[in-house]
Amino acid sequence: CGTKLGCGEGGCGACTVMISKYDRLRNKIVHFSVNACLTPICSLHHVAVTTVEGIGNTKKLHPVQERIAKSHGSQCGFCTPGIVMSMYTLLRNKPEPTVEEIENAFQGNLCRCTGYRPILQGFRTFAKVSGALEWAQPAPKAGNCKKHNWEDAKDLRSTGKKNEDFKPLDPTQEPIFPPELLRLKDTPRKTLRFEGERVTWIQVSTMEELLDLKAQHPDAKLVVGNTEIGKIPWRPLGIAGLFLSLFSLPELSPLLYTHSFIGYLGTKRNTMISVHMDSRDIGFGVREAWFNPCPSILREVPCFPGEFFSAFKQASRREDDIAKVTSGMRVLFKPGTTEVQELSLCFGGMADRTVSALKTTPKQLSKSWNEELLQDVCAGLAEELHLAPDAPGGMVEFRRTLTLSFFFKFYLTVLQKLGRMCGKLDPTFASATLLFQKDPPANVQLFQEVPKGQSEEDMVGRPMPHLAADMQASGEAVYCDDIPRYENELSLRLVTSTRAHAKITFLSVLEGSQGETLAAGTKHGGTLLTGMLSLVCSAIFFIQPRPICLGMALPTVRVGSPLSISSEESDPQSCLQDNLMETILQSGLIRGLSLLPPGELYIGGQEHFYLETHCTIAVPKGEAGEMELFVSCFSYFTRSTLISTAVALAAYKTGRPVRCMLDRDEDMLITGGRHPFLAKYKVGFMKTGTIVALEVAHFSNGGNSEDLSRSIMERAVFHMDNAYKIPNIRGTGRICKTNLPSNTAFRGFGGPQGMLIAEYWMSEVAVTCGLPAEEVRRKNMYKEGDLTHFNQKLEGFTLPRCWDECIASSQYQARKMEVEKFNRENCWKKRGLCIIPTKFGISFTLSFLNQGGALVHVYTDGSVLLTHGGTEMGQGLHTKMVQVASRALKIPTSKIHITETSTNTVPNTSPTAASASADLNGQAIYEACQTILKRLEPFKKKNPSGSWESWVMDAYTSAVSLSATGFYNFETNSGNPFHYFSYGVACSEVEIDCLTGDHKNLRTDIVMDVGSSLNPAIDIGQVEGAFVQGLGLFTMEELHYSPEGSLHTRGPSTYKIPAFGSIPIEFRVSLLRDCPNKRAIYASKAVGEPPLFLASSIFFAIKDAIRAARAQHGDSNAKQLFQLDSPATPEKIRNACVDQRPHYVMTDFHPGEAHSSRTVAVILLLL
């Protein structure tokens, strides 16, 4: 069960294992972490493979497994085995790594749940300089409700643990390298050969043999590791031909090709020759490597005096990402001068192969390294590196701009290194040459300690670890596809449409195919099956002759059989903008007020990208039509029905168990995601910043069916005010039907889109008024007892407390001054700081869904079996429910066992959604426990000194039922769509690179109201996980479609979620103290969805930094408005920073003197 399949293309790390081999060159055993999904079996000859099961189990956890479990670093747990093995491999190679080495070890691992911080915090205890100092340190001056000083708050503590809380790492106790493999170290190396129908694999044993084979087979592919031979399902590479593995040749170390060098090459005669490579030899295509049939590069000679190299890369994410544009640059000066002798500029991402600026560079020879050369090179590159508007990969303006930005950085870098020979560089320009560095992290997580006198057995309010953490860390947790295969089981694959809007004209099983194909319906190839999903939404299961989106499941499901399908093309509608309302309605409420120019904001969609893809197993029972379905927990509310319906149908038709687990590309293509939104707004306000009137028209891209789009739009409109009182308000919402897969529920359920729009126009009001944004936000914030725009009274309104504490704990005013100082002193790097509130309504707006059920069994030994209507998907729901039952029954949690959610125990369950599952199911458990306690009351009175076990046995022998159900539903009040609200505030600081659009998240402070927390560790984990998921939504994750409706971003290689290095360097989370919530179980509050929107503080901090750049470089002023759509990717940041006039480079700069030196224009915007 340990190793997981998350993507099948080596991009998520869920399948990470350790391989070990004896290295003859270094005369030692070496260990590597590899992606099992890509590692060819043929390459594992004489190699030991270790999976997560091989290092420990729940009876005896390895220290790596223990630390991630106890540090609350596992939620859904699907990624955990891979992360454990990455850390384990590092420790096998280096038992005392540095913090930086630990962080680098996870560059191939992704996690969608935790927000990464607890994983890093737990594993930093292995470092030489232990991270224990981080969580033992006193928190900074922060928000106590009275003194604003955490050091004075004695009832606060951190979730972190110290080294002494864990078992020590003992390298001597690790499994030994297999002796039978170790004995082979002295035996001569032999050639290994595997032959198949289409593939021949040869693992060569000597350099001479390699060169001979390469000479005989020039087209043979050289393989070290995987080298792109792995098949990406939706992007087949055609695995066939001859492969030469170099894995057994330690003398061939990984080599870096540079643009121009003299190297020593080996020929098939094993002689050495000297070869000079220049720009004309460079021409690598995508996924190609240069290898002449005869020579192989062995080593590279060092640089010459007066020679400078630089390399540049810009990608969507700094870790494990394919660059949009790369560049290698080299200049060689004539001895003792600044005259160019050689200049080489190479770029990737500007064509289908690496290109060299051969027209531009020769013109610069013998020129001095000055502004004239800078101008000539930039003009030359702009002309030479031309991209057509429809160039593959898009981002044309961004990519062309990057080529000039990279050279500008290279020019300044060389200028700095030349020093006095070129005069002193303006110090404000020096930031252009600095890379974003990884700074030592500093994390603080604070929560209120339980009251004095609370029983040690009462775990409510304590940071109890996730119940499944040990099983997840050891690989023992069983996920849907881990269930052993049934006898006679079939595997099902969906056949999907390849066109967005078409008519099926032909469908048949290809001749000679093996297996069974099931077609539902008529001679036309299908029937239309529509229905209500859980009485909540409508969806289309199968569609008759006309598919209405690319990737739609057709009325045929394939069980081991290839199909032939023909169709006729129709015109698809794949653009939300095609369905926009012509004009916004006029409001008569804003006469005499200041008006913002009518504005609009586009918010992109988001893929769920949970590490476990959709999986369903259907098992016919053979009695009275009974069928048992096992469905993966990440069901995305309604979309699991698409898979489970097909699987159940296949199982019914065949009478055999059927299993379907979607590949990552299928999952992303079929299931839909967060709704893209477009908003058009008008705002009326006073010059003091007070908002008087608002009108917003919301448009969402629903896809090809309604699904949950109506409810999502309703919540977006409910949250269009965010946290602000607006006297006159009008909001409309329209759902646009498009020929794309149906979009569906996603964390936040429309709330983040509605609130982002509110904060967007609020920031524009602040800019227009010339007032600080935090002042305008605070001025318009609701107060206790105010009515919302849907007439719900705000009671227990703690948002002002959260705001004040966040202002204090983040040292907002002092840091704001530091940001302004930084921006004055740095021309090409800018910082932004922003503080954002959130108000999120808790409950299903479809009121009858606000119900929960539970079943409690008490056995004669005193043990308790608990089940409820909620689904555990990593959020810690089961853990909290055990804590609730423990307090209600007044017994230790060790006596309580919880079973997985099943409809044969608790029927008619509501979806585990709307952040309300702990409230609903927790109260239902409480009611069931009270029933049990009432039945036990006579026996307690009869034997007051007895134990829980004795009372239970007495009840049993007296024939009293020890089983009870519980049921609970929210009280309904007319006009109140929400049971209560959750509140929070986040302050974030970022730094952007104005030349490339890259950004770094410096610090985030969060104050979150979760009531009286049931489990602070789980709640803080939810806050951090939601925040990082929101960080992806607002700054990183982009879905790209072709004009025909084909999804381009179908896996981790093209769709980038936040990685370990994406989180804020300083990540500080505190839970608001002394704020019990009388409307939920044990005074707690919901926490799953509300914190996600707080990541918009990163988005608006980026916009703040962009504004500073535009004010300095442009012909605009700080009050000028500009549009920045979400997500704020490097492309959007860079394009927004750019201005309409030239930039200038200052040399011969002397502090205190006027800048009267020579200047030259650097054209950074291609107009």
Image: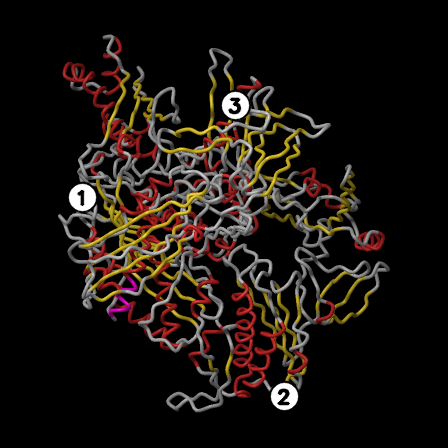
Quadrant of the rendered image containing residue 898:
top left
Q: Where does the image place residue 1151, in percent across and percent down from the top left? A: 39, 87
The kind of residue on which mark 3 rests is Leu
Left or right, 139 with reference to 673 = left
Magenta segment: 763-769
Look at the magenta stretch and give its main secondary structure. helix
Q: Which residue is mark 1?
A: 792
The kind of residue on which mark 2 rests is Gly
Above or below, 735 against 593 in this view is above
Q: CA distance from mark 1 to mark 3?
A: 46 Å
Mark 3 secondary-structure assignment: helix
760 and 626: which is toward the camera: 760
Q: Which residue is mark 2?
A: 336
Mark 1 secondary-structure assignment: loop
Above or below, 269 against 788 in this view is below
Graded by Cα atoms within 10 Å as few (under 14), some (14 to 19) or many (20 or more), the crowding at tag 1 reads some
299 and 237: which is toward the camera: 237
Q: Where does the image place residue 977, in percent across and percent down from the top left? A: 23, 39
